[in-house]
Image (cartoon, grey):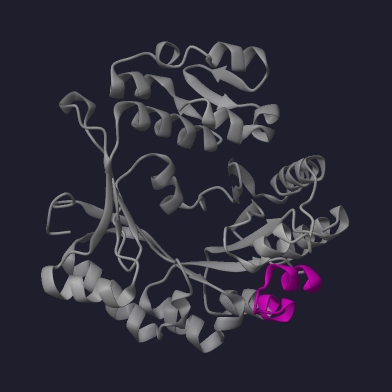
Amino acid sequence: MQQSPFAGSSVGTIFMGGGTPSLFAPQTISMLLDGIRETGSVVENAEITLETNPGSIDLDRLRGFRQAGINRLSLGVQTFTPHLLRALGRQHSVDDSRTALRDARSASFTNLSLDLIHAIPGQTAAELQADLDEALSFGPDHISAYSLTYEPGTPLTRDLERGRVQRLGNEEEAEMFETIRKVLPPAGLMAYEISNFARPGFEARHNQAYWRGNPYIGLGAGAHSYRPGKAAENSFGRRWMNLREPAEYMESVEGTGLAEDESEELTRQQAMGEVCWLALREGRGLDTRNFQSRYGEPTLEAYPHIPELCEQGMLEWSDDWLRLTPQGLLAADDIFASFF
């Protein structure tokens, strides 16, 4: 923080994830947070999230994390259906998830988020409904409900390639997506992004920072950072990634204080496209006035295909905001790609 490009910045959110940071002792987490506060200014009431898997924590550790300064907990529940947990290759059990959710409240976490995955091979509509019902029974403040992504090199992807499992059809996946968006808002969890639902005031500020193009710094092996550019100075942003191997990362940090591996300077077209698709992920949509102020060009001139998407019922205007329609949500990836 004392070095460019983040000198003089204040930290508004801290997110500990990218693995299972809850395996660290609470005292270690406390030391890390103290170090961040000593290095840079952390705003009052900053959102400080710890990501954890249900099988890796207990009540004492959760109390320790809360005392260390963690004020938001994100639990990777994924599903409450045993055979679907096994299909995902998860190590925790359904009972682990139930215990962790109860213990989180006992440990005084008042900002509790859980992750659910849908469109798992073999999953039925009834099983999804049961997952949603049980998740809501714990009164979470936030739910991230993601469609299953097949990552290269994972056991599940290899099973898919070998024909051992079958991907759910597009219609089934779309029906599950619509079920989630129908069930969660009446329970008080409003859709503020394509896959994220929260009680008012409990939206993930850290994720909103990503979607809104705010700067962020990543600490640790393989972590990513981003610095926005200034269009007036013909600079459109830079992002970089740290060395992936932990040993190399630590050696580099100890030697030079830096551990950058790969970097990229964004072009004007890249920056504009990213502003559009990231903003359209959010329920509020794209502020076209801000876009024009930022890039000196009206959105409709930069992207003349927008009226066609509106005519197709994919996008809609509300004052100067452009957002996805319910129909557009189902074709979001294709719409996003059209901005590049």
Left or right position of 286 against 216: right
Look at the image and tell me whether residue 139 can be seen: no
Left or right position of 282 against 314: left
Look at the image and tell me whether residue 276 can be seen: yes
Left or right position of 86 against 60: right
Magenta extent: 81-98
Q: Residue at x 52, y 63 (%)?
A: 111
Residue 277 in the image: state x and y as whole percent: 48, 33
Quadrant hosting residue 95: bottom right
Left or right position of 248 against 90: left
Query: In the picture shown, does residue 285 fall above or below 300?
Result: below
Query: In the picture shown, does residue 302 fall above or below 258?
Result: above
Query: In the picture shown, does residue 132 fall above or below 172?
Result: below
Extreme-front residue of the structure: 162
Magenta-drawn stretch contains 83: yes
Secondary structure mostly seen in magenta is helix
Give the camera-side residue of 330 and 73: 330
Q: How many marks?
A: 0
Residue 268 in the image: state x and y as whole percent: 30, 27
Q: Residue at x 41, y 34 (%)?
A: 274
Q: Residue at x 18, y 64 (%)?
A: 258
Residue 14 in the image: state x and y as whole percent: 36, 61
Give the camera-side residue of 59 and 270: 270
Quadrant hosting residue 163: bottom right
